[in-house]
Image (spheres, helix red, strand yellow):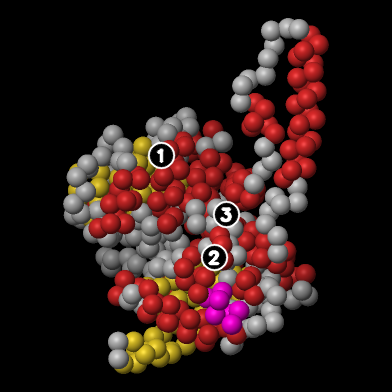
Amino acid sequence: MAQKKEPSFRQSVDLMFNRAVALMDLPPGLEQKIKVCNATYTVRFGVRLRGQIQTFTGYRSVHSEHMEPVKGGIRYSMGVNQDEVEALAALMTYKCALVETPFGGAKGGLCIDPRQYDEHELEQITRRFAYELAKRDLIHPSQNVPAPDMGTGEREMAWIADQYARMNTTEINARACVTGKPLHGGGIAGRVEATGRGVQYALHEFFRHPEDIAQAGLAGTLDGKRVVVQGLGNVGYHAASFLAAEDGAKVIGIIERDGALVDENGLDVEAVHQWISNHGGVSGYADATYVEDGAKILEIDCDILIPAALEGVINLSNAAKISAKLIIEAANGPVTAGADDILRERGVVIIPDLFANGGGVTVSYFEWVKNLSHIRFGRMQRRQEEARHQLVFNELESLSDQTKSEWRLSPDFKQKYLRGADELELVRSGLDDTMRAAYQSMREVWHGREDVGDLRVAAYLVAIGRVADSYRAKGL
């Protein structure tokens, strides 16, 4: 019997798309229009480094322009290639539609190992890459807005924004050409933590529904749930940190590129993160059991598995051995289409990537709006909110004095009630609302249709339906 072949990342995205559209009544032409990638630009540019010219290859792919600008991160990795970038751009289209941000899908990548270059060299490379994209309008506030992804962060986004502004000296909205910038460079409070925070809010919403919890073979709340996190980068770290510190979950396993750490009593996420920052990996960390073959820890018994790094880590070779009851895809495409089939047959519930990691693009949307409006959130209404709350508080105090009863307001009520929301609180509120609404739209399809057996198909059905509606509204 021939061994089942593992689909590539791009094939996985296409297979999952096909599974969903088979349950829809789309005209064949529209189905093809939504599926195909509109355009991919490949750039090869030279930068003089260390006494010689080094040539780099980069990509910017636009999957769908049913809404503009198109949105999607730029990753720096040696694994970057055209197929991967186009698959990620397609995921961005569906993700933006699902979480209702008014963007089309795009993605960018540079084939580079950022650890091999110092900061000044990386700045030269990033600025040249940004120049090559911007001069073709592949970076533009109203057409194509990148963001951070694997291997990039606030620093790189600040360089890109500055490079664009230098090239467009009279563009008043230049800062809106990219999101994920530092707070003092046109960024927004809560953007760095956004994807990890979104994973937390996604789990909060899942655990609000006893029927869904039972389907995963779980019970109760997040408190005490045993969690394994694969990849303690920006997304994995924030998700693990929030779940442990705020929800009482126990992070019993952390998997990194050089191995894994395990502790049944729960790992100190902050201490492990600090160790990785200082040493580049988990090897040598003293307060937990070190396992050299980190991938094996994906298979240990746990309640929730959070793959938060690369695509394809759960595949045909290990899907049958996964013991987690619930998988939430903090990374893009961590479960291959082949593995997805096996896990579904075994009854494992998967919260899919296009919903689970939608926090990043949601808060990117807030940052883009902030840049276009040229005012931080909360500036106009915060003190007015406080003044209105003061009126209510004064009335309550007056009632208390008039009745002469023992009834008293709790000591910190005044401080909490009077304080108007700042930008961070408004961002978190908007993100929480977005994740709740997106989950509800998936859940409606998941439980409302007999031919939909899992959340991933439900997510694709919702997203593709919204993209189709956009194209129809354009007259296509």
N-term mark: 1 or 2: 2
Residue 115 percent coordinates (x, y): 31, 71
Instruction: Write down the residue under mark 1.
Output: 244
279 on left or right of 56: left
The quadrant of the image that shows the C terminus is bottom right
Image coordinates for residue 447, horizontal then vertical, percent: 60, 44
Residue 136 image label: none
Residue 208, position as x, y percentages in the image: 56, 36
Residue 170 among those drawn in magenta: no
Q: Nearer the viewer, residue 335 or 329?
A: 329
Q: What numbered label is drawn on residue 181?
A: 2
Say how many tags the image has.
3
Q: Where residue 189 is drawn, which disc sits there?
A: 3
Report the amino acid beneath label 1: Ala
Looking at the rendered structure, the secondary structure element under dot 3 is loop
Spatial CA distance of label 1 from label 2 is 27 Å
Q: Which mark lies nearer to you, 1 or 2?
A: 2
Magenta part of the protein: which range?
160-166
Could you tell me the amino acid type at mark 3? Ala
C-alpha distance separating marks 3 and 1: 22 Å
- Classify residue 268 by image quadrant: top left
State the SS at label 2.
loop
The residue at 67%/19% (across/down) is: 409
Q: Quadrant of residue 286?
A: top left
